[in-house]
Image: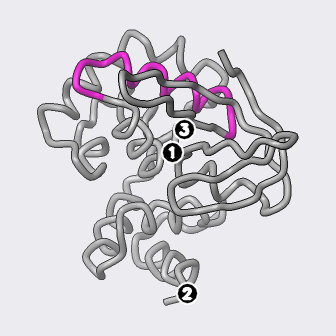
């Protein structure tokens, strides 16, 4: 099993990167937040190797918590590695935790490809596993204004991933009123 990798980044794309480890270039798929946390020179990633009949795919994560949550997601029937990465690209670990603790399936439904039934299934499955998967993540409330910001940005044509990244880039002391948060998020998007 490959637990982690450390090496030089030789190529970085929208859904992964090639990490040069010695003389070998290893392709690693990763979530948007993980890719954003990596500089263009060197990277250290926690990894999970998924073996399928026709492929070996390596997934990389910035934190062990993110990898543990990925592992938890793929144990849920109907959630494969690609959908798990999409969830982690769309929602932060804190937002997943808030959705599960408040049993708010609409937060999970913001992920492309997840409908109401799947979101509810994820909430039910994670309810018991939440503490195991997210022990070292501080509980934080999903700011309700963030839902308004996400709706506004996606309504303006930004993808859920772009909107989520703009929300995560908001300063911690940003006012909680929706209008100000939307304005600040648009500044983060360069709009």
By secondary structure, the bulk of the magenta-drawn segment is best described as helix
The local secondary structure at tag 2 comes to loop
Of residues 177 and 165, the one nearer the viewer is 165
- Between the C-alphas of marks 2 and 3, the distance is 27 Å
State yes or no: discs 2 and 1 in contact (Cβ < 8 Å). no
Please indicate whether residue 22 sits to the left or right of residue 86 in the image. right
User: What is the quadrant of residue 123 in the picture?
Assistant: top left
Q: Earlier in the sequence, mark 2 or mark 1?
A: 1
- Estimate the x, y position of residue 188 in percent, counting from the top left: 58, 78
| Residue located farthest toward the bottom when viewing the structure as drawn | 191
Kindly identify the residue that appears in the image at 38 percent across and 68 percent down.
149
Seen from the viewer's position, the closer of residues 54 and 77 is: 54
Q: Position of residue 184 (x, y in %)?
A: 54, 78
Classify 128 as above or below 169.
Answer: above
Q: Which mark is residue 134?
A: none
**Residue 190, disc:** 2
In the rendered image, the residue lying farthest to the left is: 117
Q: Is residue 177 magenta?
A: no
Upstream in the sequence, badge 3 or badge 1? 1
Q: Secondary structure at mark 3?
A: loop
Q: Is residue 172 left or right of residue 29?
A: right
Classify 10 Å Cα crowding around label 1: few (below 14), some (14-19), many (20 and above): some
Range of the magenta residues?
62-79
- Residue 70 image position (x, y, % from top left): 48, 28
Q: Which residue is mark 3?
A: 140
Mark 1 = which residue? 92
Q: Quadrant of residue 124?
A: top left
């Amino acid at each position: 099993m490959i637990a982690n990798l450390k090496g030089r980044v030789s190529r970085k794309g929208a859904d992964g990167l090639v990490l040069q480890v010695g003389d070998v270039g290893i392709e690693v798929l990763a979530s948007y937040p993980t890719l954003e946390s990596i500089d263009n020179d060197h990277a250290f990633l926690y990894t999970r190797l998924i073996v399928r009949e026709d492929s070996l795919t390596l997934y990389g994560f910035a934190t062990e918590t993110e990898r543990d949550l990925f592992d938890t997601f793929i144990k849920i029937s109907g959630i494969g590695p690609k959908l798990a990465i999409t969830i982690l690209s769309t929602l932060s670990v804190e937002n997943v935790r808030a959705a599960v603790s408040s049993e708010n399936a609409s937060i999970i439904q913001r992920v492309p490809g997840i409908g109401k039934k799947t979101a509810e299934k994820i909430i039910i499955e994670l309810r018991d596993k939440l503490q195991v998967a997210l022990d070292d993540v501080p509980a934080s409330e999903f700011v309700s204004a963030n839902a308004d910001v996400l709706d506004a940005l996606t309504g303006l044509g930004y993808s859920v991933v772009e909107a989520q990244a703009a929300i995560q880039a908001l300063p911690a002391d940003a006012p909680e009123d929706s209008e100000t948060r939307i304005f600040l998020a648009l500044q983060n998007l360069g709009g």
